Image (tube, rainbow, N blue to C red):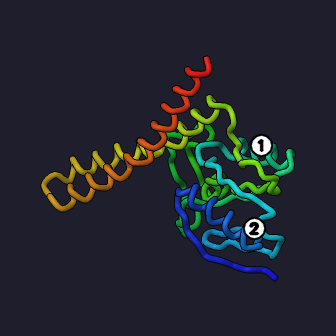
Amino acid sequence: MSLKKNRYFAGFMGAQAKWLNSMSKKGYRLIKTGKLQYEFDECEPDKYVYTVEYVGDKSREESDKYKEFLESIGYRVFYKNITLDYSPGKITYRPWAEKGGRISTTRSTLFKELLIIEKENDGTPFELHTEKEDKANYYKRLSQPWYYLVFLFLLFAILAWPLIPGVIALAALALLSIVPIIIAEVKIHKLKKENQLEE
């Protein structure tokens, strides 16, 4: 029997992975994703584990190659969206992305910013990035869009200076956008410190 659930996690990949793993513990395996919808089939409880990977900064070719690589080593992989824009023919500019991924359209990587990766539960933690340097680079990639958001919110706050309520709202958004940057930087610092201890 299949089960359909509607959820939206935006860019909160950890929360999405946690929810998918909780569904697996209840005996449901992911079989299909949509913009808001997740479809599951019944399975043995806790048989599968999930992780979520950001690929919104890659070109379509690089994303497809990475997906194919993960599938070649035995994982099941689904594309998932971060954005919810329903307008056709949408084009997005991502200045933080790799050269081939800066302009994103519905035919390239728009609505395919995330990969949901599934493997059979063998009792070991599900980590795609095991090397410290690889993890640090991934955290840097994750924080780059937030730097641009902080810059834009601060720029709009300066431009909206005569409208005090607007300035306060934009400054608050800028401060909130700093939180993911701080989290990523703390993780990177911790990895660098661990690396120095090992040397």
Question: What residue sits right under mark 2 in the picture?
Answer: 30
Quarter occupied by the N terminus:
bottom right
State left or right for residue 43 relative to residue 165: right
**Is 165 above or below relative to 1?**
above
Q: Which of 62 and 136 is in front in this view?
A: 136
Q: How far apart in space, not on screen, are marks 2 and 1 (Cα)?
A: 22 Å
Q: Where is residue 40 in the image (x, y as percent from the top left)?
A: 75, 73
Q: Where is residue 158 in the image (x, y as percent from the top left)?
A: 21, 47
The amino acid type, in three-letter code, at marker 2 is: Leu
Residue at image position (77%, 73%) is: 27
Residue at image position (63%, 39%) is: 100
Q: Which residue lies furthest to the bottom in this view?
A: 1
Q: Nearer the viewer, residue 197 or 146?
A: 197
Residue 65 - label = 1
Q: Earlier in the sequence, mark 2 or mark 1?
A: 2
**Is 68 above or below relative to 192?**
below
Residue at image position (68%, 71%) is: 38
